[in-house]
Image (tube, rainbow, N blue to C red):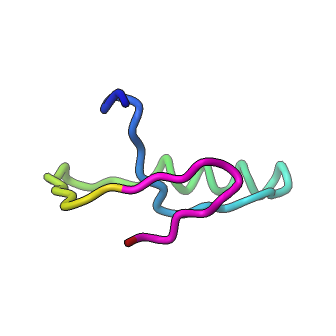
Amino acid sequence: MIPANFHITLVFVGAVAAEARQALEDAAARIAARSFVLTLDHFGYWRKPQIFMGE
């Protein structure tokens, strides 16, 4: 596994109409926050189509 390919899904929106998608993208573009350090104590993954729910 390549760490540069890792990601964290904060919210899965699912299928949305084009107008709603644009509104979500516009809202995300306006988010401003300071950077921070995130430390993870373990990691998990799933092979499709299973869903990983944590520990």
Q: Quadrant of the C terminus?
A: bottom left
Q: Nearer the viewer, residue 36 or 41?
A: 41
Answer with left or right where residue 6 lies relative to residue 22: left
Whether 16 is among the magenta residues is no
Which quadrant of the view contains residue 11?
bottom right
Residue at image coords 81%, 53%: 19
Is 28 placed above or below 4 here? below
Whether 51 is among the magenta residues is yes
Q: Nearer the viewer, residue 8 or 45?
A: 45
Answer with left or right where residue 36 lies relative to residue 31: left
Which quadrant of the view contains residue 2?
top left
Q: Position of residue 20 (x, y in %)?
A: 76, 58
- Farthest residue, direction right: 17
Q: Quadrant of the N terminus?
A: top left
Which quadrant of the view contains residue 49?
bottom right
Question: How many marks do you count on the picture?
Answer: 0
Residue at image coords 64%, 56%: 24
Residue at image coords 27%, 55%: 33
Residue at image coords 16%, 53%: 36
Identify the main secondary structure in magenta: loop
Q: Nearer the viewer, residue 30 or 10?
A: 10
Q: Position of residue 4 (x, y in %)?
A: 33, 28
Q: Position of residue 22 (x, y in %)?
A: 71, 48
Q: Which residues are magenta?
A: 44-54
